[in-house]
Amino acid sequence: MTPDNNYHKAMNYCTLCGNIDVPINNDSLCNMCDVDKINLVIDDLYISSVNGANNIDELMDLNITHIVSAMPNIPNKIKKNDFICKHINVEDDCNQDISQYFDQVIDFIKSNKNSTLVHCIGGVSRSATLVIAYLMKEYRMTYDLAYSFLKLKRPIIFPNDGFKRQLQKYEHLLAL
Ligand SMILES: [Zn+2]
């Protein structure tokens, strides 16, 4: 057998994060890149899509007591359980002012001794923007560093251009 044959041996890899030899789903994504996975960010802070947030059993397992819902409505399943919710009524739209909520979301996360989940619909733009703002303020990370850090934890994050500009403005405000 030539080395070339060996090289072409079938290998599982994630088309998003490039992880090799990991179990992949039907969309060729690894478990970590699964949109509905609840991803740990840092300390007791998690991020997910709305489907992840609807997984009440897993929220209980993770000791999540506080939830930031960054979408027009708090999901019914979450409303029906005993979570402490912070509702951020924002659309994933470049023209929405999400920065007005940065400080109140950060204070909400800090106030919790248990675990907190920040979610939106896809866990891609709105929730990622709020979590990046938290990392910037609490860990003194620049926007670029906080973005890269969060991307390692949840590879599918992608704040929209307007949100990115607001985070860069926040970086100046925080004198990072
Ligand atoms: Zn992956």
Image (cartoon, rainbow, N blue to C red):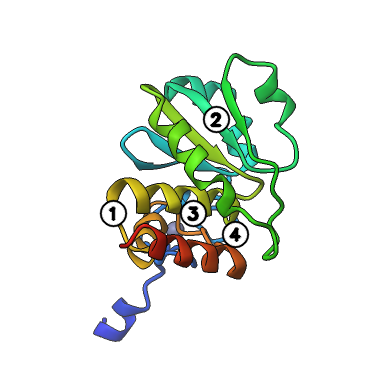
* Residue located 41% across and 47% down the image: 134
Q: Rounded to the nearest whole Å, what is the CA distance between mark 2 and mark 1? A: 23 Å
Nearest-to-viewer mark from 1 and 4: 1
> What secondary structure is found at the residue carrying circle 1?
loop
User: How would you rate the neighbour count of disc 1 (Cα within 10 Å): few for under 14, some for 14-19, many for 20 or more?
Assistant: some
State which mark lies toward you, 3 or 1.
1
Q: Residues within 10 Å of mark 3 (few under 14, many from 20)?
A: many
Report how far apart the C-alphas of labels 1 and 4 lie in the structure. 36 Å
Q: Amino acid at mark 2?
A: Ile
**Whole-percent x and y of residue 158?**
54, 63
Using a 10 Å C-alpha cutoff, classify the residue at mark 2 as few (fewer than 14 neighbours), some (14 to 19) or many (20 or more). many
Query: Which residue corresponds to mark 2?
Result: 67
Asked whether 109 or 45 is in front, the reply is 109
Instruction: Name the amino acid type tagged 4.
Output: Asp
**Which callout, 3 or 4, points to the residue nearer the camera?**
3
The first of marks 4 and 2 along the sequence is 4
Between the C-alphas of marks 3 and 1, the distance is 26 Å
Q: Give the labeled residue for mark 1.
A: 140
